[in-house]
Image: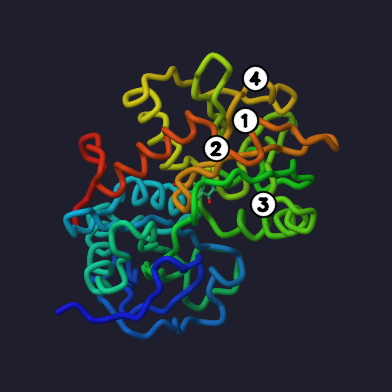
Amino acid sequence: MLKEVNIDWQNLGFAYMKTDFRYISTWKDGKWDEGNLVEDNMLRISEASTALHYGQQCFEGLKAYKTKDGKIQLFRADENAKRMNRSCRRLLMPEVPVEKFIDAVKQVVKANEAYVPPYGTGATLYIRPFVIGVGDNVGVKPAPEYLFCIFCLPVGPYFKGGMTPVNFMIADYDRAAPYGTGGEKVGGNYASSLMPHEIAAKKGYADCVYLDPATHTKIEEVGSANFFGITKDNKFVTPISPSILPSITKYSLLHVAKEYLGLETEERDVFVENLDEFKEAGACGTAAVITPIGGIEYKDKLHVFYSETEVGPITKKLYDTLYGIQIGDVKAPEGWIFEV
Ligand SMILES: Cc1ncc(COP(=O)(O)O)c(C=O)c1O
């Protein structure tokens, strides 16, 4: 019997909720232990942990979806495992074997099955794996021990009552350096994004658009999502740079655009001076799949793409197809879905 939880699935936001179980595994003396599920959501770590002082930590974000026939599935969880390992390598943390990562995610989802939102509500189960450097170590060097943890929580439908475009502004700050850690999902990138985000929010924008840190002429990220645009001749275009986080949603959309919608695709530089080459634009990531971009403020002028109030037809089709794949309504490419 599934535990009864009293959750208003339609009105969930994106806020922390303590679910029943989380996974924790410790790396010590050169290896990971088996790991296990625990109920306590508090971590007890050394005050000298590198994660607390030197940002030696990384994280991931993925979701579990309920299908029409009641199954629970994960979307491209192996890609999250591989990306987490790239982050671990960059920060000299031990990698987590892909099978261990997927098995642990499945354990957490199964143990919290009651919190997986029903099909049709638009809500999903958000899963947050992370690796942190812990143990006694005050020098700037890698930690002696590590924790690999996963918790999960139900999150609301991103668009209540339809997809609504939002506006962004170009940031005056960088989130990452040219050969820094922008391409990895490490906490430091997000710490440095808090202030530019707040500045944008105070000016009434959803978030800011980051330009390439070397020349400040090319679009890199849109808040904590990747950018894509649809050109006037129907090409799906997305920027390429080592300081962009390789979005799993973005690479999935590149495939969907080409193989499901028959569009030409390009990964290339997107110059902020050339925004009028696009008739539609969007931000993509796990949270929203796609957030349509109404306009971007650049040099005190708002450049509007399709519309500030309506979603463009290609953006809508991309969203419907990818979300359809994630919830099992549309046939997925081989290897994209992991049944729990
Ligand atoms: C900076 C940044 N860019 C892009 C993304 C989108 O990546 P994904 O599609 O893998 O969720 C995220 C979210 O993970 C992010 O934090």
Q: Earlier in the sequence, mark 4 or mark 3?
A: 3
Q: Earlier in the sequence, mark 4 or mark 1?
A: 4
Check if mark 2's residue and mark 4's residue have beta carbons within 8 Å: no
Q: Which quadrant of the figure has residue 107?
A: bottom left
Check if mark 3's residue and mark 2's residue have beta carbons within 8 Å: no
Residue 312's x, y, as percent? Answer: 54, 32
For label 1, the crowd category at 10 Å Cα-Cα, with few meaning under 14, some 14 to 19 and many 20 or more, is: many
- Give the secondary structure at mark 3: loop
Q: Which quadrant of the figure has residue 26?
A: bottom left
Q: Which residue is mark 3?
A: 206
Check if mark 1's residue and mark 2's residue have beta carbons within 8 Å: yes
Left or right side of 292 for 275:
right
Q: Which residue is mark 1?
A: 306
Residue 322's x, y, as percent? Answer: 36, 39
For label 2, the crowd category at 10 Å Cα-Cα, with few meaning under 14, some 14 to 19 and many 20 or more, is: many
For the residues marked 1 and 2, what is the alpha-carbon distance in whole angstroms? Answer: 7 Å
Check if mark 4's residue and mark 3's residue have beta carbons within 8 Å: no
Q: Amino acid at mark 1?
A: Tyr
Query: Depth-wise, is mark 3 or mark 2 nearer the camera?
Result: 2
Q: Which residue is mark 4?
A: 277
Q: Is mark 4 within 8 Å of ligand 1?
A: no
Residue 8's x, y, as percent? Answer: 40, 73
Quadrant location of the C terminus in the rendered image: bottom left
Q: Is mark 3 within 8 Å of ligand 1?
A: no
